[in-house]
Image: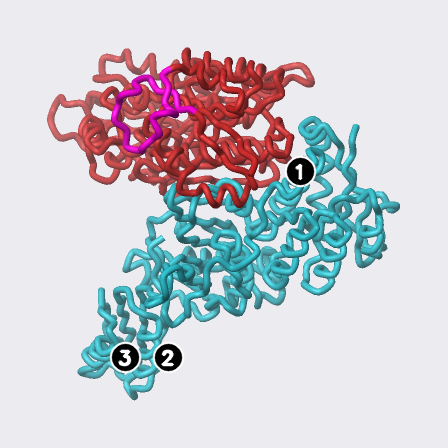
Chain colours: A cyan, B red
Amino acid sequence: MREVGIGIAGFGIVGGGVLSILRSHADDIEARLGARIAVRRVAVRDAGKERAVGLDPALLTTRVEDLLEDPEIAVVVELMGGVDSAFDLVRGALERGKHVVTANKALLAARGEDIFRLARQQGVDVYYEAAVCGGVPIIRTLREALASDRINSLHGIVNGTTNFILTAMDEQGARFEDALREAQRLGYAEADPTLDVSGGDAAQKLCVLAQLAFGARLKPEDVLTEGITALSPEDFRWGREFGYALKLLAIARRTGPAEGAAAGAPDQIEARVHPAFIPAGSLLAGVRGAMNAVVLRSEALGPSMLYGQGAGAMPTGSAVVSDIIDLTRNILAGSPGRVPLPPDRPLVELRPHEEVRCAYYLRFSVKDAPGVLARTASKLAEHRISIAAVQQREQNDQGQPVPLVIVTHQAREADLRGAIDEIDRYPTTLAPTRLIRIESV
Amino acid sequence: MREVGIGIAGFGIVGGGVLSILRSHADDIEARLGARIAVRRVAVRDAGKERAVGLDPALLTTRVEDLLEDPEIAVVVELMGGVDSAFDLVRGALERGKHVVTANKALLAARGEDIFRLARQQGVDVYYEAAVCGGVPIIRTLREALASDRINSLHGIVNGTTNFILTAMDEQGARFEDALREAQRLGYAEADPTLDVSGGDAAQKLCVLAQLAFGARLKPEDVLTEGITALSPEDFRWGREFGYALKLLAIARRTGPAEGAAAGAPDQIEARVHPAFIPAGSLLAGVRGAMNAVVLRSEALGPSMLYGQGAGAMPTGSAVVSDIIDLTRNILAGSPGRVPLPPDRPLVELRPHEEVRCAYYLRFSVKDAPGVLARTASKLAEHRISIAAVQQREQNDQGQPVPLVIVTHQAREADLRGAIDEIDRYPTTLAPTRLIRIESV
């Protein structure tokens, strides 16, 4: 029986999942492929460490060069994480004509362009289903099923940690700090949760998705990014009154060419990660706990959604193994390069964040004094922002701030920011105004 | 540039969608494939008919033989519908070594086994993404992404017509007849809606899905099938009180080997299509109108869901074009047979319907007389059915039936049927008991 050799770099949670799936499905995989997938080397940092999944010690190495130098290894599976060493490994593999499977979104967000260019030059494949939303086949769908379609927008819950925290805040009325502690206790959040709760992880994933869906070239720092640390149980309560659920969304949306651009100018896309109010009855509102989901809107298919587990040894391991199987099929058929890489030049440009148009929820903390509402409303009007709904809570204690909530119609981000800056300088404004964007997904 | 010739049989709504997508995306498709897809013939019943999408008259033919006999046609796209003529065409194509794309679930449900056997013998491909849930890539997902996984259950809203009707009954409190008429007026239901509202269409789709997901061999008549015609607005109201939404589901679930079977006996699966109460907060409950969705539960991925438009020229056309593109890639790479067909022997057997275990909602129409509830409850207990909740409406008119609703714990279908048969013969039972299964999706 023919055999395709693979080398795995990094053997943590996901690596263990990959190996155990390859073993338990070896017969199925052989029957489907007519060939065997042979794990020839596994590169680790510490060869002496105890591991949950048993491994023949002869396979272990601490030198990634052993993977690169083995001519029998056709596919390098990068599960190391991080950017620099992972990039060196991937570049080394591609330069030697080896195919690459990676689960590393940070690497793709930072160095994707270089990696895809090199793969194109070398005529080899790069697969990365596990890099975004582990168990959700979003990369495959964007790469293949939509080859004959045109995507207009993408809205994703792509970070399980923050969705777990927001679900707890919603369902139990928990404060952010308490929900985070609970997520850490249950293993849904890391000891240092910054990358997740800041929205940074979601921004990396959005870069990878937007490249494939729109042909965009984005770095994480290009994405308008706001995290969830400032959200309070009060925002969830207000949202419920207006019929909204509150989610951290990664959003990319085609908006057509820039206003006043020459004929033939490329489309622009908005790219942003932030908490968003969405209709309580929408499908994304029903995505709870650590689950992930991506809603696409495209010309032929209309709206569609993929939903599943975003992380974990088995879901992510399964995505890696699917990639290995696909790649092996291509190799056996002598047809690598079958699945298109992202386009080799940017097809769209980033729309400046100040030009983003949204409806907004604004929670003002104001002194309960006559004329405050009138002045706030006229300041918004002055900045071309029209009001859809207003609610003011009854006052409890003299002199305490009263919350005033205003929901606006669609407005330009720059106009909104201008109005808030001025309102926040009023002596009757007692705390910075809280702003949450509203999305109709 | 290389060229792959295709022939299309049938040129209705979907055919028009296919042609317009192939045209509008011709440049993209050529760039991705490095080859052109050339439509060489289009076989129609009536060459003189006016069509929404313009077509070179030289391409038109009324003889499907023209497709089969053209050596330049490598792919036959079957969009005729029906079983017998479609089967003749598909067989003819496969026998001549042509690949087949079909959107015909009835054909696959009735003759899938013959078609896949012939394709295997001939070493050619059969693609059928559009046959089930047009714009939802469920076939691709089952075929490829889950190659390294094991599916335990599948719950689908796979018929847009009935979901449209049930959504109207739920949201507007409409009666079935009125919701059906509205669906017909809007083009969501056909003049003769029998195949949809009886559950027959969903049963055909379930056969196609269960073959791929479980290696089952089912005919539509093997599926426990109940339609939606007997549902009343009252069932929706009761469901809401218990926290349920009401959907027509297609369900296939692995239940392990038969009780008492010898070691190594194959797993059984339940296969059923019926209205089902599901938790109001579940994702499937949020699938409204004519949309489709399929929830899979599998060992590695856990729960996942695909959601999208199930019908329509563009969603279905897009699925057909995706298949054509994939097939063309395989042909250009000289690697047909890349994507596995369903297994060539059944891997599971059908669990007898009487052994299905569900929780049930039972709505009795009983005379308001002393002892009726007690007698009903003890009859259920006698048949090993335990009660989870009871509700009885207050009586309005003397002598009128009062509804008594009982929700049971999990029970065996045969036991339940036995109890209902006896209860329905009581003189105090004024109308046949209404039974709706409860699923925790």
User: Is label 2 in contact with label 3 (beta carbons under 8 Å)?
Assistant: no
Asked if residue B268 is among those painted magenta in the image, a careful observer would answer: no
- Disc marking residue A58: none
**x 30%, y 35%: residue:** B239
List the residue tagged with mark 3: A397
Which SS class for mark 3? loop
Disc 3 to disc 1, C-alpha distance? 73 Å
Which SS class for mark 2? strand
Which chain does the numbered disc 2 sit on?
A
- Disc marking residue A335: 1
Q: Main secondary structure of the magenta part?
A: loop
Q: Amino acid at mark 3?
A: Asp
Which chain does the numbered disc 1 sit on?
A
Residues at discs 2 and 1 both on one chain: yes
From the viewer's perspective, tell me whether residue A106 is left or right of residue B379. right
Image coordinates for residue B35, horizontal then vertical, percent: 54, 38
Q: Amino acid at mark 1?
A: Ser
Question: Does residue B414 appear in this view?
Answer: no
List the residue tagged with mark 2: A432
The mark lying in front, picked from 3 and 1, is 1
The span picked out in magenta is B41-62
The mark lying in front, picked from 2 and 1, is 1
